[in-house]
């Protein structure tokens, strides 16, 4: 897990990576997005927004092919995060959705307005009920994975 206080701090760390530049581009367009509608930029990033008053996760969610990046558009998101190896599987991995679900406990972090949280591939996360505001979630391709039709 890596947390950045704002986009400027994140930009210093991305080293010109195209996929992370696209993530910053998505953040720049976030005010124009409708909640729960998925958008994409190229083939490396898919993103959408959540109204956090409507999101309560009972299970941790992890991915294998796409890295999760979270951006707090407004308010504060309270997120539990844990290493997948320290959690119990709750639902098998789905290749169609690139999601796997877990139960257990993790470390709670706060993502304040303007902050960015990168969830490592070895981790899973869940959004907690005390969260409020709007959160943008992005699924970003992981280097080394390719699409057969490209």
Image (cartoon, rainbow, N blue to C red):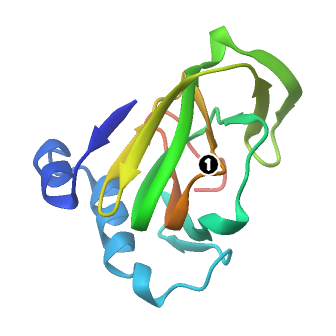
Residue at the spot x=35%, y=71% of the render?
A: 27
Q: Which of 76 and 102 is in front in this view?
A: 76
**Which residue is identified by label 1?**
147
Question: Crowdedness of circle 1 by 10 Å Cα count: few (<14), some, many (20+)?
Answer: few
Identify the image quadrant of residue 84. Answer: top right
Residue occupying the point 21% across, 59% down = 7
Q: Is residue 14 left or right of residue 75?
A: left
Q: Residue at x 13, y 58 (%)?
A: 8
Residue 115 in the image: state x and y as whole percent: 31, 54
Relative to 65, say whether 34 is above or below. Answer: below
Taking the view exactly as shown, the residue that stands out farthest to the bottom is: 32
Q: Which residue lies furthest to the right in this view?
A: 91
Q: Can residue 85 be seen in this view?
A: yes
Residue 54 is situated, as x and y percent measured from the top left of the image, at 72, 67
Viewer-proximal residue among 95 and 30: 30
User: Residue 113 location in percent, x, y?
Assistant: 33, 63
Front one among 67 and 80: 80
Residue 93 versus residue 20 in the image, above or below = above
Image height of 40 relative to 66, above or below: below
In-front residue for pair 134/46? 134
Q: In this view, does 137 lie to the left or right of 63?
A: left
Q: Which residue is drawn at 87% across and 25% down?
A: 90
Q: For the residue labelled by badge 1, is the local secondary structure a helix, a strand or a loop?
A: loop
Can you say whether 92 is above or below 65 in the image?
above
Q: Where is residue 19 in the image (x, y as percent from the top left)?
A: 35, 54
Question: In this orientation, does residue 46 appear?
Answer: no
Q: In this view, does 20 lie to the left or right of 41?
A: left
User: Which quadrant does the C terminus fall into?
Assistant: bottom right
Rendered-image quadrant of the N terminus = top left
């Amino acid at each position: 897990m890596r947390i950045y206080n704002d986009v400027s701090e994140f930009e210093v760390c991305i080293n010109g990576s195209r996929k992370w530049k696209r993530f910053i581009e998505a953040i720049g367009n976030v005010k124009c997005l409708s909640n729960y509608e998925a958008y994409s930029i190229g083939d490396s990033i898919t993103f959408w927004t959540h109204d956090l008053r409507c999101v309560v996760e009972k299970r941790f969610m992890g991915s294998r092919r796409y890295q999760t990046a979270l951006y707090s558009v407004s308010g504060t998101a309270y997120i539990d995060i844990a290493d997948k190896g320290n959690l119990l599987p709750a639902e098998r991995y789905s290749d169609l959705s690139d999601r796997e679900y877990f139960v257990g406990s993790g470390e709670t972090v706060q993502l304040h307005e303007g902050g960015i949280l990168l969830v490592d591939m070895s981790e899973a996360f869940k959004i907690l009920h005390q969260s409020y505001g709007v959160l943008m979630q992005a699924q970003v391709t992981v280097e080394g994975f390719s699409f057969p039709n490209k």
